[in-house]
Image (cartoon, rainbow, N blue to C red):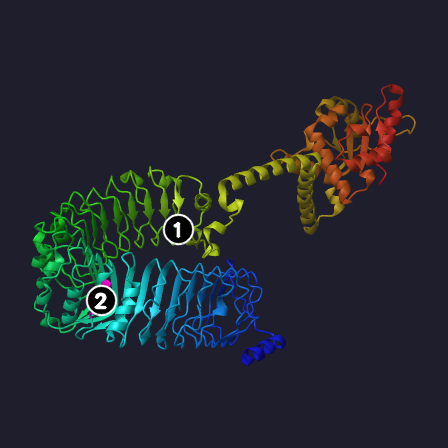
Amino acid sequence: KHGLTRQKVFHTFVRRPSCDRCDRRLACNCSCGGWTCVPTVTDRALTLDLSFNYITAVTGDDLTGHGALGSLSLHGNKVSAIHPSAFDPLWSLEELDLSDNQLSVLDHRWFLRLGALRELNLLHNPYSRLGSGAVFRPLVRLRRLRFGGPALEELKRGDLSGVTELEELTVDANNLTRYEAGALAYVWPLDRVTLRLRGPFLGNTSLASAVLGDVSYPETQLVLEDLNVMRNRSAQPFRETASRRVRKITFRNFSVSDEAIVDLLMVMNGAPLTSLFIDGLTLSGEGRWERAKRTDHKSIDEFFMRNVVVLKVFHFASFLELSFLLHYPSKVSIINSQVFVMPCLTSRLLVNLQYLDLSDNLLTDLTMMETLCNGDGTLKGLRALNVSGNALKSLSTMSQQVAKLSKLTHLDISRNGYSFMPMGCTWPSTLRYLNISRAKLTSITPCLPVTLEVLDLSYNDLNRFTVPLPALRELHLSGNKLLRLPPGGRFPNLQTLTVQSNTLNTFGPADLRGYKRLQDLQAGQNKFVCSCDFVHFLRSALRGVGDVHLTDGAESYVCDSPLHLQGEPVGRVRLSVVACHRVLFVSVSCGAALLVGVLACVLLWRLHAFWYLKMMWAWLRAKRSSRRRRRDGEASEQLLSYDAFVSYSERDAGWVENFLVPELEEPRYRATTHRAPRPLTLCLHKRDFLPGHWIVDNIMSAMERSRRTVFVLSENFVLSDWCRYELDFSHFKLFDGSAGGEAAILVLLEPLSKEDVPKRFCKLRKLMSSNTYLEWPQREEGRAEFWRRLRCANNEDE
């Protein structure tokens, strides 16, 4: 008490360590953490595992605030002291494990507030008795109780007072020396009792009889562990069990001699024993069963043996003398017992046999023929046969041996050495279930019976499955090398399909469309390519959309490729629109780009960008030509061949030819000046353009070789394409700065405002606004002045 007080004070001033290993389900796994005291965890924890640490004590404050805790494990610590109120806050606790600790005394105060407790484990602690008073009385809902250990020596009447309606009771009483009759009788009804009775227990006949008598009820399954029945009279305690008419007995880790077995059979003579289970049997002796022949065990229906070792097996002449036991069972299991043959004579004795399990033994094709009496139908009532895990290799031989078993419905031949399936086999027409999993088959043939409803071919080397089986309801193909799902049309009644751990890359609605009745599909743990169609389909299927349900859980479906999604659960994959709808995206993108391009072209056209680019290119080309000529030594003056280049519309050619050309090139004598004006050389496209040259080159060359450019402006001029070219090049010449504004002479043949000039000719429009232009007079008297002014404009640089 003082030690606990000091411990409480210590915890008051010293902060306890914390454990943060709790998952989303509020299950806190703090095992193997090296804790020396109970660590702190979240108050919302539902499960707390503190096993395999170094905790020595549980104080009154360690579990405060854990009212929601449903399970607590302190297994495998060094707990020697628990405060009387340590578990009081755990009013919701249903499971408590205090096994494998150092508790030398059990205190009833620990359990006063644990009214919800359903399972309590107190095994392997050094207490010699269950304590004073009714330790378990407050546990009104207790259903599973385990107590005892090497130190338990005494059980008294009243120790289990208050404990009723247990589903399972386990008592480790290997060293029990004192037992008051009726100590375990308080517990009733009782579904299952496990007694560990190694040591001197059976040597004390009265003590053993008292214990077995208190827990033996017809409806209770009795499990006896660690028994060693070798000596005379060691079977006598079972007489009480027989008298209580126990129907089910299980022996675990059972060492027995042939004589002791005979004694047991004689003691249990006439008892209504229906099931005998032996798990872990070591048998010694010479196989002498004569004394047991007169016993009556007609009630035995099920006989189960596993992990049997027969010492000096060759001393046992035969088991045929046990024929009085073999006539009655309908279920016989002899598992992992090194059985290499069951003689045909023994098989003939099993006249009521319906279920035979000889799995994990040493049977071969040859010894199997002996066991089944060469397929003569000896075991005519057999409905289920399990010979998995043996050394069988011929599927043809197996089919022939069972062909005459006219009631056989279930056959398990898995974990054998089958590597080849013949084209034809003979099977009983009643066969409905066939298991050939974990063999070495590489292909499937029509050898399979068409009557099958359940077929398991898991973990072979199959890469396809196309054999039609019209009656099949379940098909298990996990662990093979399938690249795609089997064609559903071959299995019109299939309801369950498992193809886990194959080499499937994808599957979808098209693959499942052939399965008319498929409900459950397990296809996880494959190397899935997470394409858009597959991800969309699988996410819908995981949500339960459609007729087929993926029953192996979303976590089984993981992407293997593409590389950036490798290892990602398919249910959490989010693919972009670009990846999922590439064609649509490209089409929309191209359409959008085309639309943007058209809009850009329209905009550029409206802004005359194409005109600027075209003119810029032509002007740059002309400039390069001009520079090349200059490098060749041509003087600027030598390049000027004309006084003016005349730009006009073809519809205005009459005015140019009848008025402009005669007046400027062939001037008449003027009385006012007493001389004729100097004739000018004009460049006309009709007359002076070089044939065979590009029209643009002719225009640029004419402008470069002319001092002036005379534009005969009219409505015809604005509408003429060629005039616009010439006006454009003149516009670029003005921009270039090789000529000033006076390089262009504007002649308005008819009234024309600057708004009639295209807006892209901003320089020309500016010139019309700022420079003087000549207007052709419609009356004769004003024309002399017009020609004079035109000549003056042309001769300004002279």
- Say which quadrant the C terminus sits in: top right
Quadrant location of residue 696? top right
Q: Along the horizontal axis of the image, is 294 left or right of 704? A: left
Q: Is residue 576 visible in the rendered structure shown here? A: yes
Q: Residue at x 67, y 49 (%)?
A: 628
- Residue 256 to residue 627: above or below: below
Q: Amino acid at mark 1?
A: Asp
- On whether residue 173 falls in the magenta region, the answer is no
| Of labels 1 and 2, the one closer to you | 2
Residue 238 disc label: 2
Mark 1 vs 2: CB contact within 8 A: no
List x then y, in percent, for residue 568: 47, 55
Amino acid type assigned to the residue bearing label 2 in the image? Phe
Relative height, residue 729 to residue 220 (above, below) = above
Residue 279: x %, y % from top left? 25, 65
Image: magenta residue range? 235-241
Of marks 1 and 2, which one's residue comes earlier in the chain?
A: 2
Residue 747 in the image: x percent, y percent? Answer: 81, 29
SS class of the residue under badge 1?
A: loop
Q: Which residue occupies the foreground of this view, 421 or 668?
A: 421
Left or right: where 141 falls relative to 280: right
The numbered mark at residue 552 is 1
Compared across the picture, whether 617 is left or right of 188 comes to right
- The crowd level at tag 2 (other Cα within 10 Å; few <14, some 14-19, many 20+) is many
Q: Quadrant of the N terminus?
A: bottom right
Q: Does residue 176 appear in this view?
A: no
Q: Nearer the viewer, residue 407 or 139?
A: 139
For the residues marked 1 and 2, what is the alpha-carbon distance in whole angstroms? 48 Å
Quarter-of-image position of residue 438: bottom left
- Say left or right for 53 vs 294: right
